[in-house]
């Protein structure tokens, strides 16, 4: 499949948000990585006839660096996962209600939450590395290194057939409902 290229750092990308606790959220929209293109039918078998597919990267700043596993870090991961899932479901259902196939990937398992899962899990860290070129530290689990937040970053992924401008509008209208304010306005 051939996907058009989207320059993600113009015209409002990334979308920079901040939560009530002061933790930053960065959201950017991208054409799919080579991994997603090569494995789309194996990740999302019901999506095999989609002509366009966009990857929405949601990066949440963590209170802790994600290098080791402690009870505090595991609780933080679960809190950030839940925040993403609440937000992601709202965005996904908003776009689906408008007729655009959309799904979010469970950051814990790598499998879609609204579509039939395929035989291959999605790899959020690999996709963020491929699309944003952020370094990854190979540890017990691979850890992204954000240019400003260091290893205190929690990545999550939404996939959608909606055009980027429609995705952006949905994100910006739904983010305030989750106490995420746009800091670029």
Image (cartoon, rainbow, N blue to C red):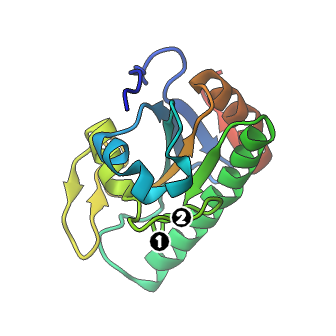
Give left or right: position of 114 versus 49: right
Residue 15 image label = none
Q: Residue furthest bottom?
A: 71
User: Is residue 154 in view?
Assistant: no
Q: CA distance from mark 2 to mark 1?
A: 6 Å
Name the residue beneath numbered marker 2. 106
Percent position (x, y) of residue 65?
36, 64
Crowding at mark 1 (Cα within 10 Å: few <14, some 14-19, many 20+): few
Percent position (x, y) of residue 179?
74, 47
Name the residue beneath numbered marker 1. 109
Residue at 69% x, 52% y is 87
Viewer-side residue, 144 vs 90 = 90
State the SS at label 2. Answer: loop
Percent position (x, y) of residue 69?
36, 80
Q: Quadrant of the N terminus?
A: top left
State the SS at label 1. Answer: loop
Give left or right: position of 25 versus 35: right
Against 124, residue 120 (above or below) is below
Q: Quadrant of the C terminus?
A: top right
Percent position (x, y) of residue 78?
56, 72
Crowding at mark 2 (Cα within 10 Å: few <14, some 14-19, many 20+): many
């Amino acid at each position: 499949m051939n996907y058009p290229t989207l320059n993600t750092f113009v015209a409002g990308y990334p979308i920079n948000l901040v939560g009530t606790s002061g933790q930053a959220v960065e959201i950017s929209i991208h054409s799919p990585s080579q991994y997603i293109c090569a494995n789309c039918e194996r990740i999302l078998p019901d999506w095999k006839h989609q002509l366009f597919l966009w990857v929405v990267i949601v990066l949440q700043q963590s209170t802790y660096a994600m290098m080791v596993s402690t009870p505090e870090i595991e609780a933080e991961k679960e809190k950030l996962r839940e925040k993403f899932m609440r937000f992601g479901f709202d965005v996904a259902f908003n776009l689906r209600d408008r007729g655009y196939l959309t799904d979010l990937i469970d950051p814990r398992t790598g499998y879609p939450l609204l579509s039939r899962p395929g035989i291959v899990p999605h790899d959020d860290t690999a996709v963020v590395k491929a699309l944003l070129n952020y370094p990854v530290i190979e540890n017990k689990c691979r850890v992204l290194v954000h240019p400003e937040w260091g290893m205190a970053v929690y990545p999550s992924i939404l996939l959608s057939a909606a055009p980027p401008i429609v995705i952006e509008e949905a994100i910006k209208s739904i983010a305030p409902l989750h106490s995420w304010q746009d800091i670029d306005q």
